Image (tube, rainbow, N blue to C red):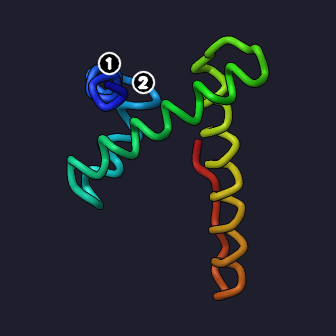
Amino acid sequence: MVVECAFAATNVRNSYFHNFYFKLKSKRGGKKAIVAVARKIMVIVYHLLKNKDVYNEDKYEQAKQKQEILRLKRMSKEASKLGYNLVAID
């Protein structure tokens, strides 16, 4: 039943589960990716019930942006170790 919910969640464009599914699908395959999405849904449901909170997808988008910033810092540090300077272009 949770796998069916995962299939439905991955059909919503530009959602956290949709992006997560297609990222994993390219690496592991469709069946394993859908099971991973189902597990992620169950973990989120557990934490929502435990903390008596409501689901807000904006939290995941903020976490993704924070993770991207940390990734850029890490890449910049690696480049400087190799003797390169990175310049931000906006």
Residue farthest toward the front in the current orientation of the protein: 1
| Picture layout, residue 9 above or below residue 54 | below
Disc 1/disc 2 C-alpha distance (Å): 6 Å
Secondary structure type for disc 1: loop
Q: Residues within 10 Å of mark 2 (few under 14, many from 20)?
A: some
| Picture layout, residue 86 above or below residue 31 | below
Q: Amino acid at mark 1?
A: Val
Viewer-side residue, 3 vs 77: 3
| Res 35 quadrant in image | top left
Residue 1 in picture, x, y percent from top left: 31, 24
Residue picked out by circle 2: 15
Viewer-side residue, 8 vs 72: 8
Viewer-side residue, 52 vs 63: 52
Residue 70 in picture, x, y percent from top left: 71, 55
Q: Check whether the beta carbons of the residues at disc 1 and disc 2 lie within 8 A of each other.
A: yes
Label disc, if present, on residue 12 of the rendered structure: 1
Q: Residues within 10 Å of mark 1 (few under 14, many from 20)?
A: few
| Picture layout, residue 55 above or below residue 84 | above
Query: Residue visible at 41% across and 31% down?
Result: 17
Query: Residue visible at 76% across and 14% down?
Result: 52
Secondary structure type for disc 2: loop
| Res 22 quadrant in image | top left
Q: Amino acid at mark 2?
A: Ser
Residue 46 in picture, x, y percent from top left: 63, 29
